[in-house]
Amino acid sequence: MEAAQLFDTALERLSPQASEEAALVGELKAGSDEAFAYVLGVYENPVYSLVANILGNDTDAADVLQNVFVKVFRGISQFHGASSLKTWIYRIALREALNHRRGWFRRHVHEAFSLDEEACEPVAALAGKANADDPYEALEQVERQRLVKAALDGLPRPYRAALVLRELDGCSYEEIAEILGIAEGTVKSRLMRGRELLRRKLASVLSVADV
């Protein structure tokens, strides 16, 4: 088998067709432990990343992650294929994370939220990359990343959620639209405005001409 054919076969396996997903959902609804283990293996890490980026707290993210998959497993009978399984799971994860965050805020109204440094690296790139060989520039890079994360955390929730899904999780416009329950045009508008708000917040503190 030629290399190109092998590559195409690998891509097909990584992106199962609708019929394959339907079969998987059928196994889940039938209570297959093997199917549940497969779904957990595929989605556990990306869902954790999404939740951690919303909450900015690893301990809370782990708790929410557990709740997400409990709801996925208990609610699979309510999944009717109107969206992809991934989108359905992400909707549950986003709702659980936002509900948890609102509850946390009510308990700790004077505390600020922050995003996990490693998870925020794609957005932190807006602050520019410093030369790690220079300790002073390395310190400056850390400070810039902190400011970027603080600015992102300060965005209104609709823009923050869209940016997290797009910039950090790499979701398509269509996926974001389905997860948030909005039109693709609204997704693009929120991303454009969210990025502009982020740039405006950063411009005054980073002294970067093109952020």
Image (cartoon, helix red, strand yellow):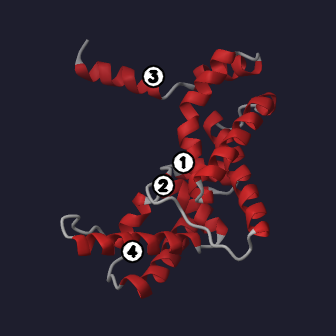
Task: State how far apart marks 4 and 2 are (Cα).
Answer: 20 Å
**Mark 2 neighbour class, 10 Å CA radius: few under 14, some 14 to 19, many 20 or more:** some
Judged from this view, the residue extending furthest toward the bottom is: 204
- Give the number of callouts: 4
Q: Which residue is mark 4?
A: 143
**Image quadrant of residue 164?**
bottom right
Badge 2 element: helix
> Which disc, if any, is residue 168?
2
Task: State how far apart marks 1 and 3 are (Cα).
Answer: 23 Å
**Mark 1 neighbour class, 10 Å CA radius: few under 14, some 14 to 19, many 20 or more:** many
**Looking at the image, is mark 1 or mark 4 earlier in the sequence?**
1
Disc nearest the viewer among 2 and 3: 2
**Looking at the image, is mark 4 or mark 3 earlier in the sequence?**
3
Q: Is residue 77 left or right of residue 59?
A: right
Type of amino acid at the residue the image marks with label 4:
Glu
- Residues at discs 2 and 1 in contact (Cβ within 8 Å): yes
